[in-house]
Image (cartoon, rainbow, N blue to C red):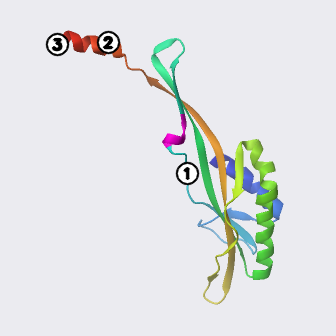
Amino acid sequence: MLESLNDILTAFEAGINTAVIRSEQKGNKPAYPYGTYKVTDILKEKAHLAVIETKPKEGDSTKCIISYKGQCDLPVSLTFVHSDARKLWQIVWKACDWWDDLAADVCEPLGITANRISDPQDRTVQLETDWEYKFGFDVKLSAIVARDREVDTIDVESILKTLILED
């Protein structure tokens, strides 16, 4: 899902007409207004909630295939920055509307569901001589992750025969 994040954020930038960069990175800050994003965690479904299936590998009795299928969530924190609080609120609400109304058009073809999981919050900080207004909210991207793993099987019959003969 991380590989799709760039495509989603590119569409988001175009939709709100505001640059969005990764937060906490080196380099010069862009001109106001701009947005930042930060992936706060990668949450995989708990093992007891995942679908796990084991089946023999066709044509090879010494191997089996373990199939895992579960939900993966990617929380993303979005923060927008400007020197004018009134203009910033307009940008933030436009961004909220994009996630509420338009994100599905971009995310669903990628197999991802997008949900805004918080309302806008004031994240303003005071600089040495002025205020830097920051307002933001969080979204959650979710996808079903499936993978197969090939493993060696255990030959229980041979082990039991060995144990019985040794007694």
Which of the two labelled residues, at mark 2 and mark 3, occupies the earlier sequence position? Answer: 2
Q: Which residue is mark 3?
A: 167
Q: Give the prevailing secondary structure in the magenta stretch.
A: helix
Q: Amino acid at mark 1?
A: Leu
> Which residues, given as a range, are shown in magenta?
47-51
> Of tags 3 and 1, which is closer to the observer?
3
> Of tags 2 and 3, which is closer to the observer?
3
Q: Nearer the viewer, residue 81 or 68?
A: 68
Q: CA distance from mark 2 to mark 3?
A: 15 Å
Q: Residue at (78%, 54%) from the top-left corner?
A: 103
Q: Residue at (61%, 57%) from the top-left corner?
A: 75
Q: Amino acid at mark 2?
A: Ser
Q: Residues within 10 Å of mark 3 (few under 14, many from 20)?
A: few
Q: Nearer the viewer, residue 63 or 115?
A: 115
Q: CA distance from mark 1 to mark 2?
A: 41 Å
Question: In the picture, residue 82 is in which quadrant?
Answer: bottom right
Q: Which mark is residue 158?
A: 2
- Looking at the picture, how far across and down is residue 68, in whole percent? 55, 34
Q: Residue at (67%, 61%) from the top-left corner?
A: 117
